Every structure is written in structure tokens, then in C-alpha cells.
Image (cartoon, rainbow, N blue to C red):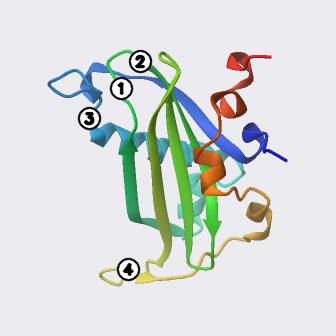
Amino acid sequence: MPHRWDDVTAHFEHRVTFSETDGLGFVHHSGVVRWFEQSREVYFRKYGVPANELFRKGWYLAVRQLNVRFDSFLGYEDLLSTRVALTKLGRVALDFHYRVDNLTTGKLAVRGHTNLVAVDDRGDDPPTLGRIQFDRRPWEALLVPADEFLGAPQGAWVPPRWETP
């Protein structure tokens, strides 16, 4: 049975600003990295663990791997939806997959992936690899197969106000 994406993912909408574009008027790749981070913050907040709470408890997650693939161009003033799904949850690392859909054109614009690892920051330089310290059990229900998430048709994941009957 397909997922109802709003139940297992988080997203935010954003209009491309001029400062996020390059000399040709298209989105610069550095903007996508920020959108991924913002969507993770929305995700953790939605599921009860805001980033500042993670830090306050001494639970640190560092980006170990980042992949970005552009599927279509994004330009100034395009309205975007960046959606994130948890696709792997281990003892030391977790994976998120992202899709940035251009709501202006209706096209999938960007697909991406990050691998985050738990680190212990005990003053070591650099910090040492640690273990995920929060209870993983509630998060297991949110796991989504990456291929299913990235291949989701537009109507399956876009917020309800844009879904077609």
C-alpha cells in the first residue's frame, strides 16, 4: 500500500530568491544544500526532536555524505517544495533522501541524499564516531524506501491543496 507522504515525511515551500541564482539566472547548487538542511530541521521538529533539543542533550549528527542530482532547471521566483524522508536508521548513521519539486513548472527538479553519523563531542579534535543516543523505535515507523520516495508521482506527495482528485 502506498504511503500517505505527509504522514512519514516533512516538507517546506520556498520561492527562489535572486541571491540563490548564478550568473545565468538558475539556482546555484549551494542553495540546494541549505534547503536539505532546512527540510531536516522541519522533519526533526515535526517528529518531536527539534535540532536545538538534540544539541542541548549532546546528541550530534554530522553530515558524512551529500549527493545532489539536478533533474530540471530551477530559476528565480520558482515556487518549490522540498520534501525529506528518513530512508535508513542504524546505530551510528541515518540516511535522508530529498526531492525538490518545482511547483511552478510541475517538474521534479532535484533529488538528493545525505548520510548523517552520530559523533561524540568530548572535546576531541576531531570528534569521534559515536552512537545514535535517542530511542530509534518511534522513528522506525517513519522509514521509507528511497526508490519509492524518489519515484513518487507528484499527486502522491504534494500537499493536499495541490492534489488533484
Residue 90 placement (x, y as % from top left): 63, 75
Q: Disc 3 residue type?
A: His
Residue 86 placement (x, y as % from top left): 63, 56
Residue to which mark 1 is pinned: 74
Figure check: 152 above or below 88: above
Horizontal side of 131 relative to 102 (left or right) equals right
Residue 24 placement (x, y as % from top left): 17, 23
Residue to which mark 4 is pinned: 127
Residue 131 placement (x, y as % from top left): 57, 81
User: In the rendered view of the protein, which quadrant contains the C terminus?
Assistant: top right
Circle 2 residues within 10 Å: few <14, some 14–19, many ≥20: some
Disc 2 + disc 3, Cβ < 8 Å: no
Disc 2 + disc 1, Cβ < 8 Å: yes
Residue to which mark 2 is pinned: 78
Q: Disc 4 residue type?
A: Pro
Looking at the image, tell me whether mark 4 or mark 1 is earlier in sequence order.
1
Q: Disc 2 residue type?
A: Asp
Instruction: Say which of 71 and 144 sits in front.
Output: 71
Figure check: 151 above or below 79: below
Q: Quadrant of residue 89?
A: bottom right
Looking at the image, tell me whether mark 2 or mark 3 is earlier in sequence order.
3
Residue to which mark 3 is pinned: 28
Instruction: Say which of 151 and 144 sits in front.
Output: 151
- The residues tagged by marks 4 and 1 sit, at their Cα atoms, a distance apart of 37 Å
- The residues tagged by marks 3 and 1 sit, at their Cα atoms, a distance apart of 9 Å
What residue lies at 53% left-to-right and 62% top-to-bottom?
55
Looking at the image, tell me whether mark 3 or mark 4 is earlier in sequence order.
3
